[in-house]
Amino acid sequence: MNLIQQRKYDMIVSEAKHLFLKHRIESVTISDIANHLGMGEATLYRYFGKKHHLVVEVAIALWRDVEEKLAELSTNSTGLTYIHQFFQLFHTVFKEEPAWYLFVADFDLKLIQEPLNASEKERYEKVLGSIKTHFDRALSTWIVHHSKCDLDIYYYTTTHAIIGLCKKLAAYPPVLTYETEINAEQQIELLIDMSIKYIEKHYTEEEK
């Protein structure tokens, strides 16, 4: 792919991202994207083969956006401060762009129906790995290396829990009475606070 083709490819992904976030994955067709871009459907099929591959590229792009924000944070903070900011970023996304979580929820379901091919899986896991790298680097500046805490389990459990809660709150409107009475953002803050207090407690115990 030459430079001109790459720029067109990136532009298509960028515009498709906005459409998917605005209207949900299933509601946007290749025809919709082509009309929005003022180009023929054949061009989109030539670049991506089918809609599923374009959706995957958008998912990778959305996680890259998150990774870039986390990289900016890591230049100004380390250790526990960064870990707290790391978790808070997902809360900020919930407040400012809940459609991000709608996309992630829809995408997770699509992957059950149509798994990633080998190349897509490698690239998708690479960007997720980059996000974890920032987290690991921050922890390495603060927590003892001989810690009994399995930091991989801590990372995946806390991020899955926080992102999963945000997805649930964004994707499914309150139905039961108690759901309408409990503030969504307070739930997220509590989960973040619990995650931070766990690692603080463990670190303190290790240092005794």
Image (cartoon, rainbow, N blue to C red):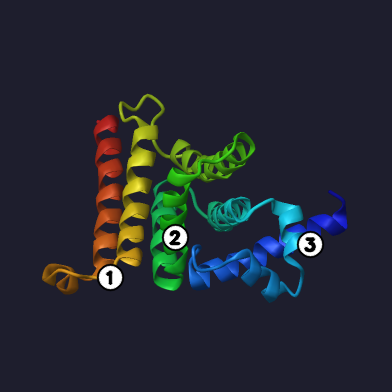
Q: Which residue, given by chain and number where applicable, does mark 1 sit on? A: 173
Element type where label 2 sits in the image: helix
Disc 1 and disc 3: Cα gap in Å?
37 Å
Say which quarter of the image contains residue 191: bottom left
Secondary structure of residue under mark 3: helix
Reply above or below: 7 against 115. Answer: below
Which residue is identified by label 3?
A: 8
- Marks 1 and 3: CB-CB under 8 Å? no
Q: Report the front residue among 90 and 206.
A: 90
Left or right of residue 175, residue 72 in this image: right
Residue under the point 75% across and 54% down: 47
Q: CA distance from mark 3 to mark 2?
A: 30 Å
Q: Residue at x 52, y 44 (%)?
A: 128
Identify which residue is drawn at 28% across, 30% down.
206
When the figure is inspected, residue 107 is found, relative to residue 181, above or below; the finding is above
Q: Amino acid at mark 2?
A: Leu
Q: How many residues crowd around disc 1 within 10 Å: few (fewer than 14), some, or many (20 or more)?
A: few
With 42 as the anchor, is 131 left or right in this view?
Answer: left
From the top left corner, tell me how far across and down residue 94 is, in percent: 40, 66
Which sits earlier in the primary sequence, circle 2 or circle 1? 2
Q: Nearer the viewer, residue 61 or 96?
A: 61
Assign the C terminus to one quadrant of the image.
top left
Label at residue 63: none
* Label 3 vs label 2, nearer the camera: 3
Disc 2 vs disc 1: which is toward the camera? Answer: 1
Say whether disc 1 or disc 3 marks the residue closer to the N-terminus: 3
Which residue, given by chain and number where applicable, does mark 2 sit on?
A: 89
Label 1 sits on a secondary structure element that is loop
Residue 11 position in % (x across, y down): 73, 64
* Circle 1: residue type: Pro
Residue 178 image-quadrant placement: bottom left
